[in-house]
């Protein structure tokens, strides 16, 4: 499809609001179109910047005092008329920020999954999705030594439909971890591994859910937290998860 048909639907795609058939078609287009991939990555970075700004925003306690003082004067009506547009604008901004944060900060699990979905989507949109490129687990695993504060095992993929593409270091809660990329047919699956203690108050129970149109599997093993995320079927994610669990 022509890029102009999709340019207005990037937000809907990353927010998981496209119909299932359009979502699959868009995901395929995104993997093949460098222009749309770059634009998608830019929008993801903008969403993350807005989210970060919203988390850091604090109101000025002197603002209300200044408004009340001026409104109490002899020209209170005129002053209120002068400040009303600003008050409406501030209220609208606060409401928009509250709605935005409510969506992404309903609970630690939701926030974490949205961040992982952003990381996975950014990987899909990147021209260089991995830093170590190899289908050999004995090449990929040693590459992480000295780059992350833990080690992990990778499964033997022979006689399975999965192919190891490579890996890179990713960060969650400002903590380094491994992001491994697996290919299943034309789909890419991200496997994130982090130290469980580095994730703070994140839930520790095994989860099977969705995040921004991606399917997610997560579990803990030997002090490590695993996340498997992709746009493949739940059965495919379960099969890859079982291979990773057996290896660990």
Image: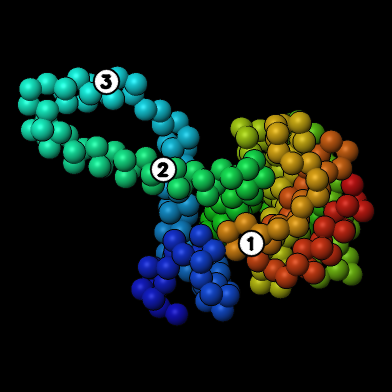
Which callout, 3 or 2, points at the residue further toward the start of the chain? 3
Toward which corner of the image does residue 16 lie, by quadrant?
Answer: bottom right
Task: Give neighbour class at mark 2: few <14, some 14-19, many 20+ (Cα, 10 Å).
Answer: some
Label at residue 65 = 3
Q: Quadrant of residue 91?
A: top left
Locate residue 103, reporting x and y percent: 52, 49
Q: CA distance from mark 1 to mark 3?
A: 47 Å
Please give the name of the residue rendered at 77% of the width and 52% of the height, measured from the top-left corner: 207
Decide if residue 205 is on the left or right side of residue 84: right
Q: Distance of mark 3 from mark 2, alpha carbons?
A: 22 Å
Q: Is residue 18 left or right of residue 136?
A: left
Disc 1: which residue: 214
Question: How many neighbours does mark 3 have within 10 angstroms: few (below 14), some (14-19), or many (20 or more)?
Answer: few
Between the residue at mark 2 and the residue at mark 1, the CA separation in whole angstroms equals 25 Å
39 left or right, relative to 132: left
Q: Is residue 67 above or below residue 232?
A: above
Q: Nearer the viewer, mark 3 or mark 2?
A: 3
Lower sequence index among marks 1 and 3: 3
In the image, is residue 65 above or below residue 160? above
- Residue at 43 percent across and 54 percent down: it is 43
Total marks shown come to 3
Percent position of residue 13, x then y: 50, 65
Q: Nearer the viewer, mark 1 or mark 3?
A: 3
Query: Is residue 159 or residue 95 the one in the foreground?
Result: 95
Of residue 82 and residue 47, the one placed in the foreground of this image is 82
Which mark is on residue 97? 2
Q: Is residue 235 visible?
A: yes
Q: Secondary structure at mark 1?
A: strand
Give the numbered dot on residue 7: none
């Amino acid at each position: 499809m022509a890029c102009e048909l999709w340019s207005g639907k990037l937000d809907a795609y990353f927010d998981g609001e496209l119909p299932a058939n359009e979502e699959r078609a868009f995901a395929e287009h995104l993997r093949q179109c460098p222009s749309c991939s770059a634009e998608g990555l830019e929008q993801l970075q903008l969403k993350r910047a807005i989210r970060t700004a919203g988390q850091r925003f604090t109101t000025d306690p002197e603002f209300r005092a200044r408004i009340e003082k001026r409104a109490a004067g002899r020209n209170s009506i005129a002053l209120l008329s002068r400040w009303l547009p600003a008050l409406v604008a501030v209220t609208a901004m606060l409401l928009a920020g509250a709605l935005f944060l409510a969506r992404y900060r309903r609970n630690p699990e939701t926030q974490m999954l949205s961040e992982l979905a952003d990381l996975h989507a950014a990987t899909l949109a990147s021209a260089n999705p991995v830093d170590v490129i190899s289908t050999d687990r004995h090449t990929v695993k040693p590459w992480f030594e000295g780059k992350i504060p833990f080690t992990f095992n990778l499964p033997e993929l022979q006689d399975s439909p999965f192919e190891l593409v490579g890996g890179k270091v990713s960060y969650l809660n400002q903590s380094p971890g491994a992001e491994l990329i697996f290919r299943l047919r034309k789909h890419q699956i991200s496997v994130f591994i982090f130290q469980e203690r580095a994730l703070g108050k994140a839930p520790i129970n095994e989860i099977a859910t969705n995040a921004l149109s991606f399917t997610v599997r997560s579990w803990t093993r030997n002090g490590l937290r695993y996340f498997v995320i992709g746009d493949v079927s739940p059965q495919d994610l379960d099969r890859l998860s079982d291979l990773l669990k057996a290896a660990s």
